Image (spheres, helix red, strand yellow):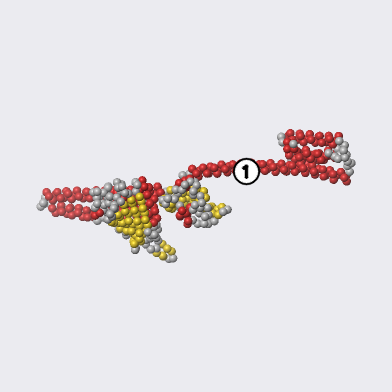
Amino acid sequence: MASRLFRNSTRSLLLRASFLIFLIALADWLIDAAIPLGFLYLLPMQVFGRVLNRWQICIAAAVCTFLTEAFNSLKWTAAVGLPRDILTFSAFSGIGLFVYGVGRSRRASSEHLRELQSEITARQDAEEQLKVLIESNPAAIFTVDADGSFSIANDAAHRLFGVRPGRLQGTSVHLYLPSLLNLPTTQHAFRTVMQCQGTRQNGEIFLADVWFSTYQTSVGTRLAAMVVDASEGLRTYEESSLHQLLSGSRILIAAVSHEIRNVCAAIAVVHQNLERSPSQGNGNDLAALGTLIQSLEKIASKDVPNDSGHAANVDLHSLLGELRIVIEPSLEDLGITLTITEEANLPEVFADRPSLMQVFLNLVKNSERAMASQPRKELSIVAKAVEQKVFVHILDTGLGVTNPNELFKPFQQQAEATGLGLYLSRAFVRSFQGDLRYETSPIGASFVIELQHGKKRAITDGQTSSHSDSR
């Protein structure tokens, strides 16, 4: 019943409280008893505490105190009545102010609760939008705890690493991105971009572009990363580089061939003149013929230089990993099984990294064509170190080579286009003091790339300088 009294509007509550005061005063006036009824004014004071402010509550308490004393049957004296009035006023004002304080705190708590609920709703909406954004993002997004284990990973991360949905949580990120082992563990935020090799669950290697940052939490350092598979870009780049190299070489050879045709045409004219005039004017024709022969010798003397100014120490393990990324998808499409075997602790080799990659790609392309019609399609790449050299064997199960003596020569009749691939490949390898040769094999073809060990780093003025392994 009391709770109903506090409901309704402010005006209604004021009218009810005033009516209660009137009824209590009337009852106190009509009933002449030894016990006064003034204590009943506590009820309307509770109502006033609900709707009035502080000074209005004090005025109402003073009115109730006056009415209590006015209808009190006890005689008022200063010694007795004044303390009684003070206590009565304190009781009335105290209960009103108490209800006022409780109501104000309740209103503040309700407002705070509404704000909190609004913030929670907004945060839930933001989290839901962020979750949808992360889950629908084609890039792999994940977080890693201080122990290097996945905390959160989206569907793209599971697809990138070849893991069933929901299985990444709790596993080590170093199984898939070993380069993250070298990250600094500082207390400050660390943000950067890196490119490294990643590994899928089935052992397949891919080139990964990684954007990541570290941040601090109450349980330690966390890492948030976004990873994109850049293998297709690497494949496109290397294959376009090989195509551009061969196209440029064909243009150059065409220009040289044009000059040779002009000289040969001039020789033919001089030869015809000599045939028509066997005894007259032979001196001028012979001089012209000698000049033309010298021009041919000058053209023929041009050869590929036997040194490379861009050669440096190359990590062959890393290069073969990139080679696998580039060639494996196309080989799988053709049904060719690829096997790359490396000797443990393979040393660095001295080579020009882009040129060596082009040599590998050209040999692999030749093997693809040779195995196109074969029932057995296997390509093996074996790298091993022997003394101060590193040998890379490339073996296939193709048709083999019918005339090995004609290999490494341009403008072969049986070769596709100009037949420059093997010629340029051997020239590249020789430019950094290596060699490329063909070895007989009972099945298919076998090519061997011979490479020198990497140059030793020289220490000068207390600092170490070395050839850089750059792509």
Location of mark 1 (residue): 116
| Left/right of residue 216 with respect to residue 452 in the rendered view | right
Where the C terminus falls, by quadrant?
A: bottom left
x 83%, y 34%: residue = 26
Q: Quadrant of residue 120?
A: top right
Where residue 159 appears, as percent x and y from the top left, is 45, 46
Residue toward you, 460 or 403: 403
Where residue 351 appears, as percent x and y from the top left, is 35, 57
Residue toward you, 171 or 72: 171
Q: Is mark 1 on a helix, strand or loop?
A: helix
Where residue 15 appears, as percent x and y from the top left, is 76, 34
Which amino acid type is shown beneath numbered disc 1? Leu
x 55%, y 53%: residue = 216
Where residue 337 appears, as percent x and y from the top left, is 35, 50
Residue toward you, 116 or 175: 175
Where the N terminus falls, by quadrant?
A: top right
- Note whether residue 309 is visible: no
Q: Quadrant of residue 348?
A: bottom left
| Left/right of residue 20 with respect to residue 172 in the rendered view | right
| Left/right of residue 36 with respect to residue 188 in the rendered view | right
x 43%, y 65%: residue = 461
Q: In this view, does 461 lie above or below 57?
A: below
Residue toward you, 12 or 256: 12
- Note whether residue 403 is visible: yes
Q: Quadrant of residue 393?
A: bottom left
For label 1, the crowd category at 10 Å Cα-Cα, with few meaning under 14, some 14 to 19 and many 20 or more, is few
